[in-house]
């Protein structure tokens, strides 16, 4: 849903829920058009085109259709548009907001590439590029070639990043990744198609039936976690092709009894399969299944008065806890990564909610907490109406087949959107940034609606810490 139609529907829905709908952000342009109309007396009407907000040939990339492969283009489009006339540059600059955002400078020459930037001050950035240059200055100046600007004022760095990504993908479809320095994040992968699967670090995501876990802040961080985590299991770490040759000498891990050694037939295929399934299940549950299993064994050993075994199991639980201590909260099973990112919006008393379903960013939700709001219950109702159907649709598109008896098919990723690595990169860049603006909440058994509403209050009051959302305990089931 686009433009005014989207806002009209959103306004009607928010009004029924007792929430003040967010108005369209064009007050400055409207005021500027009124100012310019007063100045038209005695002036050539052909020159008075500065403040017009409409679709023109100077914005070809903005008027063309939405790229179907990029959902972010629909999410956060550039809303304000102004044509530039050097003769009226002072009025032009006054019409631009002095807010952080993304700015796109369109060129007069047909086919010329636009100039796309993100800035802490839209007006100052336009003045720097479009003002008359000083004598001898070597700064970039587009005064004689720019036809106009399109921009979007943003309320947070994450909204700015998402806006920049969506617009760059339209304007520079071949090099937008290099422009944004967008690199797929580091993940852990278990190749379940191999007879003897192993866990390793990768940056590639494919719908190849593998198990993917992440994202991590860096490759080094993923390797550091994998080193401690894989010490808890006896799966292989080598990259050789397993031939089950009894004459094969093995490796240091088999000598240290840290691997079942399928390379020289040190175990049966069924034994290795059972160990690999334990490892993948532990990853899928962020270590919960392994911890619960060891705690049950320790309890049984204590009840049977086998205190030596209970003490050994207790030390193993401490080792598991130490390995999981370095696991970031954002690192999860990729096809089940559901979360919401909360940030401040440009509009006053408004929160912008970015849902994430199966690792894919979805269109944002505007939550207005104005004077006419009826209370937090209506906001929770709105969130439930938006998040629950989306989660169900995501689960239907990425079936886990929980009833599948074969653990490999149950844990395999069956579908992978082409945008998945890029959206995970956007999430990882924001989540691991310091300081981090906004809060994030993950969906485990259910969405933590009460914690989300409390976080909205903190963001509106300006008391939200960078880790307050991430460090909160999991909601009760």
Image (cartoon, grey):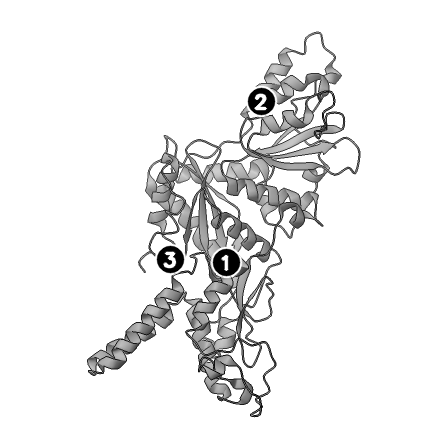
| Label 2 element class | helix
Is residue 195 placed above or below 454 in the rendered structure? below
Q: Residue at horizontal 49%, vertical 36%?
A: 155
First in sequence: mark 3 vs mark 1: 1
Separation (CA) of disc 3 from disc 1? 24 Å
- Callout 3: 10 Å neighbours few (<14), some, many (20+)? few
In this image, 216 relative to 137: left or right? left
In the depicted view, which residue is nearer to us: 4 or 473?
Answer: 473
Is residue 321 placed above or below 160 in the rendered structure? below
Tell me the tag on residue 216.
1
First in sequence: mark 2 vs mark 1: 2
Residue 9: x, y in percent? 51, 40
What residue sits right under mark 3 in the picture? Answer: 446
What residue sits right under mark 2 in the picture? Answer: 30
| Label 1 element class | strand
Residue 279: x, y in percent? 45, 74
Observer able to see residue 335:
no
Q: Nearer the viewer, mark 2 or mark 1?
A: 1
The answer to which quarter of the image holds residue 98 is top right
Separation (CA) of disc 2 from disc 1? 45 Å
| Label 3 element class | loop
The answer to which quarter of the image holds residue 26 is top right
């Amino acid at each position: 849903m686009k433009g005014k139609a989207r806002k009209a529907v959103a306004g009607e829905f928010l009004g029924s829920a007792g929430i003040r709908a967010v108005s369209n952000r064009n007050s400055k342009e409207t005021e500027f058009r009124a100012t310019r109309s007063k100045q038209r007396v005695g002036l050539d009407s052909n020159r008075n085109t500065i403040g017009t907000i409409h679709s023109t040939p100077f914005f070809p990339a903005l008027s063309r259709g939405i790229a179907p492969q990029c959902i972010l283009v629909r999410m956060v489009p550039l809303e304000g548009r102004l044509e530039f006339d050097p003769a009226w540059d002072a009025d032009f600059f006054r019409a631009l907001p002095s807010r952080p955002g993304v700015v796109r400078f369109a060129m007069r020459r047909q086919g010329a590439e636009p100039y796309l930037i993100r800035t802490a001050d839209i007006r100052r950035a336009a003045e720097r590029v479009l003002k008359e240059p000083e004598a001898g200055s070597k700064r970039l100046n587009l005064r004689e070639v720019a036809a106009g600007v399109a921009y979007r004022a943003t309320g947070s760095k994450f909204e700015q990043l998402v806006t920049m990504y969506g617009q760059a993908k339209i304007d520079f479809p071949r090099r937008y990744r290099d422009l944004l320095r967008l690199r797929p994040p580091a993940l852990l992968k278990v190749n379940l198609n191999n007879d003897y699967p192993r866990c390793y670090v990768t940056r590639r995501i494919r719908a190849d039936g593998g198990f993917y876990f992440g994202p991590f802040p860096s490759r080094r961080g993923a390797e550091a976690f994998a080193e401690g985590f894989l010490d808890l299991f006896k799966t292989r770490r080598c990259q050789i092709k397993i031939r089950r040759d009894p004459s094969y000498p093995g490796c240091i891990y088999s000598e240290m009894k840290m691997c079942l050694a399928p390379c020289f037939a040190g175990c049966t295929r069924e034994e290795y399969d059972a160990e690999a399934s334990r490892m993948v299940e532990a990853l899928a549950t962020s270590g919960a299944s392994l911890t619960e299993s060891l705690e049950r064994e320790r309890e049984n050993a204590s009840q049977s008065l086998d205190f030596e075994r209970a003490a050994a199991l207790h030390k193993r639980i401490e080792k598991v806890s130490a390995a999981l201590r370095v696991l970031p909260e954002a690192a999860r099973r990729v096809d089940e990564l559901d979360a919401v990112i909360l940030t401040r919006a440009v509009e006053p008393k408004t929160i912008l909610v970015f849902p994430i379903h199966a690792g894919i960013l979805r269109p944002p939700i505007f939550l207005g907490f104005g004077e006419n709001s009826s209370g937090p219950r209506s906001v929770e109702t709105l969130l439930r109406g938006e998040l629950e159907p989306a989660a169900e649709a995501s689960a239907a598109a990425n079936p886990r087949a929980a009833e599948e008896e074969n653990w490999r098919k149950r844990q395999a990723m069956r579908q992978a959107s082409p945008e998945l690595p890029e959206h995970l990169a956007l999430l990882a860049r924001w989540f691991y940034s310091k300081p981090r603006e906004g809060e994030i909440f993950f969906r485990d058994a259910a969405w933590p609606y009460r914690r989300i509403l409390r976080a909205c209050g903190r963001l509106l009051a300006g008391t939200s810490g960078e880790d307050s959302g991430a460090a909160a305990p999991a909601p009760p089931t």
